[in-house]
Amino acid sequence: MKFVDEAPITVKAGKGGKGCLAFRREKYIAEGGPNGGDGGDGGSVFLKADEGLNTLIDYRFTRRFQAENGQAGMGTNCTGKKGDDLILTVPVGTSVIDDDTGEVIGDLTAHGDVLLVAQGGWHGLGNTRFRSSVNRTPTQTTPGTEGEMRNLRLELKVLADVGMLGLPNAGKSTFIRAVSAAEPKVADYPFTTLVPSLGVVKVNRHRSFVIADVPGLIEGASEGAGLGIRFLKHLTRCRILIHLVDMLPMDGSDPIESALGIVAELEKFSATLALRERWLVLNKSDLIDAEEAEDLKQRMVAALNWQGPTYIVSAANRDGTVVLCENLLNHLEATWELERQDPAAAAAERKVQDVMQQEAREHIKELRERHFEQRREAKGQSAENDLSDDLDDDDDWNEDDYDVEFEYVR
């Protein structure tokens, strides 16, 4: 299944049915009076989270959805049929944003979560409703109201407790294969990971957490270099970030300079995400002797002014990975317990995540607009370009249906 993590759609709720103008006319019954029924309400549009989905590919090409209109009222006080609601299924972890106002309508973070995104129109009233002691033969009716119409942007952010970041070939995919049942592609060339991958790390039979691997960053990623920073938004839901550093890069680069570059790109992307708790993990200890590894660790801690935990591991040989995962889970469980006991702490965490996600949207939007401007300049077109070209540009920007498989491994 091809991975799509962002999709603009337009939803329109059904229109309410109009009221009926009718009078009772039966043999031997004089002046039967009004009996026009009300119309039916229009159908509403809902989004529902489904854990069986892991991509927004269904909304890649079909982008307009409309609920059923309400039926008009009928004589003999018959009410029109209500329009059927339209329920669109999306992956768990989908955020819904009003594309016109930028308002975050809601997040679907659990299986079965339902979110109303477009309210159906109200029914019109039949003339029976207007009968009174001074108006025995009313001819008034009301039309149904229009259903709500919205331009939405769906953003999928994978649900993980721990997120990994680092340069291409730092060993992130090897690490996630070592600690979970996930099997992302591993090769001796950069950018083998093109989309996020998830794995469940089981420390023991009843204790586990979810870890996410995102495509590697390079210098200039915040300006669009490499695969850019678009996948960093998937880390905004993570409680802990693992900064994985290759101690012996194949290209001979300095690991300390590489680590500093990743921190700089993270700060450019989101200042709040850069302040997220991070653990420094130096990988590939099997390729370097213990004294050199410890010396590199001390120099890197000093260069980064590192205050958090630091580990030396070998993902390929699984050396040090068990202790690291146990410590990660212990820290996560303490955090979860604190939030269960203290609602204020849980609210503060949600607020931090909202800020990170807003900063991510703003940065990606700015990068997208810059991308559009560069394409217009290359084509010799003005900023007042027609809408069709803008849509073409947007489709090109969202060209994320890579020919790779994406699956959650449980």
Image: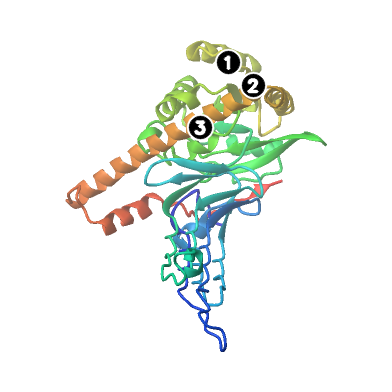
Which of the two residues, 345 or 262, is positioned nearer the viewer here?
Answer: 345
Asked whether disc 3 touches disc 1, contact meaning CB atoms under 8 Å apart, the reply is no
> Would you say 171 lies left or right of 219 here?
right
Residue 21 numbered mark, or none: none
Residue 47 image position (x, y, % from top left): 56, 53
The residue under the point 45% across, 74% down is 21
Residue 300 image position (x, y, % from top left): 52, 15
Quarter residue 144 falls in: bottom left
Label 3 SS: helix
Which of the two residues, 231 or 65, is positioned nearer the viewer here?
Answer: 65
The residue under the point 60% across, 18% down is 293
Is 223 rendered above or below residue 95? above
**Disc 1 to disc 2, C-alpha distance:** 8 Å
* Quadrant, the N terminus: bottom right
Is 302 rendered above or below residue 44? above
Label 2 SS: strand
Q: What crowding class fits label 1: few (fewer than 14 Cα within 10 Å), some (14-19), or many (20 or more)? A: many
For label 1, the residue is 297
Residue 206 image position (x, y, % from top left): 81, 35
Asked whether disc 1 touches disc 2, contact meaning CB atoms under 8 Å apart, the reply is yes
Q: Mark 3 or mark 1: which comes first in sequence?
A: 1
For label 3, the residue is 354
The residue under the point 49% across, 66% down is 131
Quarter residue 160 falls in: top right
Q: Mark 3 or mark 2: which comes first in sequence?
A: 2
The residue under the point 23% across, 56% down is 386
- Label 2 amino acid? Ile
For label 2, the residue is 312
